[in-house]
Image (tube, rainbow, N blue to C red):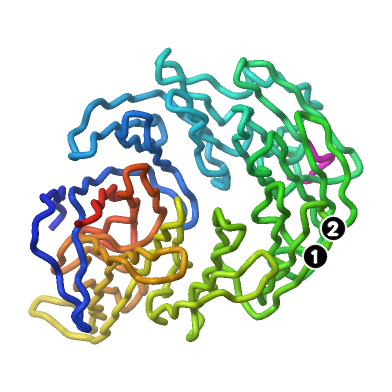
């Protein structure tokens, strides 16, 4: 029952009505694309709005190629570019791909030799190892743990020099590739590796952190540096938590697996601590506030807005079943807030059919829907949207517990990935797309949502 699916439609006055009577607008258009076999938490696609309002999605289609598709606002495919890219995925823990500009993007493997810079104008894909020209000890690789693009177009990579033979780290390293192609690097032999890297928004600076082993996730015993180019300045006062956001007004860190936030002021001094939230995602807003989504699995999960001093401005409860698999996705632009929820329903049973082996087969009915809320800065709901829902009756082998091909299904979106607000006020969403087998998510869906007047 394997089929190829593609769904598209026009925005019309027809609306979908939820149980409570709320109106859900469908996507203006949606299209699907196939990804290589990736691990659950690994991102191998990225989306960007171009200067002319078109939308570009780049993705690793297989272990030999990267594809870049460009769509206009009406959903027409304007162009498709394909580039050779065959990294060695002995360990698939590379950082997500990044757009540096409308014409340049990066896909990352474990190290520079397995990472690539793609130039859409020159139509080239160049290994980062050739561009960085690092001098490494024999038997070492530069294991990339994080990558960011700064305001000046610099690509910053952080991680450590790792022995191939036993995977141990020898020293922490930062490498910087400028927009003009010049490269620099620096190492800190006193540290094993850097494991966290974030840009300092509004500047050409960044923060890198190394963590001493402890039992908290994320680790809280941090050694932190403020970087510019390859110059690193120690910040001994930033020792609490893993930094998530930073700009000239301060920096925000998550302090542990059990939740909690720690804030540093504009002078990067300890400011305030908030232990009443369990952050899964944090987003800065233009009014110097923060949007916090609760971690998944919580029965009282919510979207919270905190002011610059950690006080709660408002909260919006999230349905408990919206957090079955991943944390909610939240985004903000020009005072408008987009929030995604993922609703799951499972009904389990067992049945036997003619010709089946003499044991029962588990049958699981699955319904998954991805929906979106549009809120203003005060948390007031402005509109709701939803994607095509996934429904399947899945066969589970009683002897192995593995899912097989669905007995029947309706293809649809089955997992959140990312939201991108557009300059027009519209937005696009990337989600997992499930067809006849939900266990292997090898397809994504790009959907364009238009604000209804």
392 relative to 137 in the view: left or right? left
Q: Is residue 45 above or below residue 343?
A: above
Task: Say whether marks 1 and 2 touch (CB < 8 Å).
Answer: yes
Give me the residue at 77% from left, 69% from top. Answer: 272
Between 426 and 358, the residue placed more toward the observer is 426
Give the overall secondary structure of the magenta segment. Answer: strand
Residue 115, by quadrant, is top right
Q: Residue 108 location in percent, x, y?
A: 55, 36
Q: Where is residue 404 in the image (x, y as percent from the top left)?
A: 26, 65
* Neighbour tally class for label 1: few under 14, some 14-19, many 20 plus, Cα within 10 Å: some
State the mark number for residue 269. 2
- Residue located at (22% from left, 27% from top): 78
Residues in magenta?
167-173
- Side of 44 where 21 appears, left or right: left
- Report x, y in % for residue 327: 48, 67
Secondary structure under the numbered disc 2 in the rendered image:
loop
Quarter the N terminus occupies: bottom left
Name the residue tied to disc 1. Answer: 271
For numbered disc 1, what is the local secondary structure?
strand
Q: In which quarter of the image is residue 339?
A: bottom left
**Total numbered circles:** 2
Nearest the viewer among 377 and 128 is 377
Let me know if residue 392 is in the magenta part: no
């Amino acid at each position: 029952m394997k089929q190829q699916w593609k769904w598209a439609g026009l925005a019309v006055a027809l609306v979908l009505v939820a149980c409570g009577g709320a109106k859900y607008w469908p996507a203006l258009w949606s299209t699907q694309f196939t990804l290589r076999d990736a691990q659950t938490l690994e991102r191998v696609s990225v989306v960007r709005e171009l200067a002319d309002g078109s939308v570009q999605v780049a993705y690793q289609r297989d272990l030999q190629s990267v594809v870049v598709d460009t769509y206009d606002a009406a959903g027409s495919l304007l162009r498709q570019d394909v580039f050779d890219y065959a990294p060695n995925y002995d360990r698939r823990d590379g950082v997500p791909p990044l757009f540096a500009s409308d014409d340049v993007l990066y896909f990352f493997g474990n190290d520079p030799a397995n990472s690539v810079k793609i130039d859409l104008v020159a139509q080239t894909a160049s290994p980062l190892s050739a561009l960085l020209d690092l001098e490494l000890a024999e038997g070492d690789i530069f294991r990339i743990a994080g990558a960011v693009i700064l305001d000046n177009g610099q690509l910053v990579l952080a991680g450590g020099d790792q022995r191939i033979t036993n995977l141990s780290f020898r020293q922490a390293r930062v490498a910087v590739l400028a927009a003009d192609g010049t490269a620099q690097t620096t190492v800190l032999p006193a540290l094993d590796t850097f494991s966290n890297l974030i840009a300092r928004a509004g500047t050409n600076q960044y923060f890198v952190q190394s963590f001493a082993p402890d039992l908290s996730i994320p680790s809280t015993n941090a050694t932190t540096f403020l970087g510019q180019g390859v110059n690193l300045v120690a910040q001994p006062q930033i020792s609490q938590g893993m930094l998530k956001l930073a700009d000239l007004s301060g920096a925000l860190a998550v302090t542990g697996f059990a939740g909690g936030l720690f804030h540093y002021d504009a002078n990067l001094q300890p400011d305030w601590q908030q232990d009443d939230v369990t952050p899964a995602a944090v987003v800065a807003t233009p009014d110097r506030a923060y949007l916090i989504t609760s971690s998944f699995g919580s029965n009282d999960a919510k979207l919270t807005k905190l002011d610059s001093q950690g006080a709660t401005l408002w909260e919006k409860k999230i349905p408990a079943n919206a957090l079955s698999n991943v944390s909610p996705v939240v985004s903000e632009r020009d005072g408008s807030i987009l929030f995604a929820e993922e609703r799951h329903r499972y009904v389990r049973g067992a049945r036997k059919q003619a010709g089946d082996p003499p044991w029962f087969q588990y049958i699981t009915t699955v319904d998954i829907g991805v929906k979106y809320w549009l809120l203003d800065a005060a948390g007031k709901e402005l509109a709701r949207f939803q994607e095509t829902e996934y429904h399947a009756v899945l066969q589970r082998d009683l002897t192995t517990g593995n899912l097989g091909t669905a007995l029947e299904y309706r293809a649809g979106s089955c997992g959140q990935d990312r939201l991108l607000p557009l300059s027009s006020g519209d937005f696009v969403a990337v989600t997992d797309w499930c067809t006849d087998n939900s266990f292997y998510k090898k397809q994504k869906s790009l959907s364009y949502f238009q604000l209804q007047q």
